[in-house]
Image: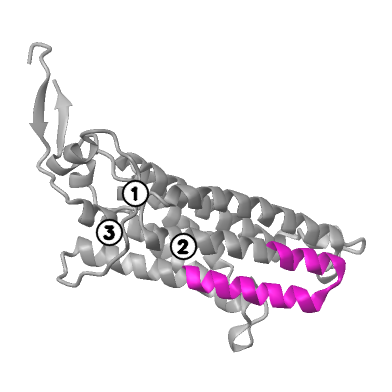
Amino acid sequence: MGGNLSYVKTGMTISPELFEKLYLTPKTPAVGDFRKRFANPTPLGLMGFIISATTFAAIMMGWGGSTTLVGVAGIFFFTGPVLLLLALIFEWIMGNFLSMMIMGMFGVFWLSFGVLETPSWAIAASYSPTGDAAEGAASKGYNAAVALYLLVWGFWLFTTWIFTLKTNTVFAAIFFFAFISSFLFSGAYWKVSTGDYGMAMKLQKAGGATFFILALLGYYITVVMMAAEMRMTISLPVGDLSHFWPTHPGDLADMEQGEVKAE
């Protein structure tokens, strides 16, 4: 080697069309051969998110007479966060920046809501002078605080949506509905804090319906990714958006040929 640089084939070749179905990150040349040696972790994290999101949305819409999230608190601590945080670690190892950020975001989002929905934490009860959980959950202070929290999440999800516009249409649509639903849920909590329970319920159901659309889109893109990984003959579109953005010369060529500089 003697300090000379040479091009070494990693043995991985992937087309832009396949890349958009396998990874939720803008097309950039991969450094190293992690994508060759490790399984794609993205569908695992998405699966945890989808199961949690679908359940959450259905309860928010009151399907089947459901009223609270206490009975499914596991989606906030296990189904969602465990799979999302595992996926986060491997997205980081594989150098998938955007996917890593998103897995971490939704992982902590579910955990934070799990804390609110766990009676033993007695967060709502702390807002009641008598320590009554129901009274605390209806208090202005509690609902205004959660509304502010969801409002901040809404702005951050909007910011992330802008970056997803460099990936594909389905993924961008997921984040579009994500920030809309966050604002709707925030509005629902605001209305509870002011005593307008009728409007609060309407906003909650609207937020649940929006979140349900988000979950269906997540389900679709996960199926697309799994089909691509399993090299199934079906071809489902996701709408590549990366070609609308300027790229550095040679980025796609480097990715296509799987070439990296090495000593």
Asked if residue 133 can be seen in this view, the reply is no
Pick whichever of labels 2 and 3 is earlier in the sequence: 3
Amino acid type at mark 3: Lys
Crowd band around label 2 with a 10 angstrom C-alpha radius: few (<14), some (14–19), many (20+): many
Which residue corresponds to mark 1? 244
Residues under labels 2 and 3: Cα distance? 15 Å
Q: Does 118 sit left or right of 252 as displayed? A: right
- Tell me residue 247's x, y (percent): 30, 38
Q: Are marks 3 and 1 in contact (CB under 8 Å)?
A: no
Residue 133 as seen in the image, left or right of residue 68: right
Marks 2 & 3, CB-CB < 8 Å contact: no
Of the pair 187 and 231, the residue shown nearer to us: 187
User: What is the span of residues highlighted in magenta in the rendered image?
Assistant: 186-214
* Side of 121 relative to 137 (left or right): left
Q: Residues within 10 Å of mark 1 (few under 14, many from 20)?
A: few
**Residue at horizontal 39 percent and vertical 49 percent from the top:** 99
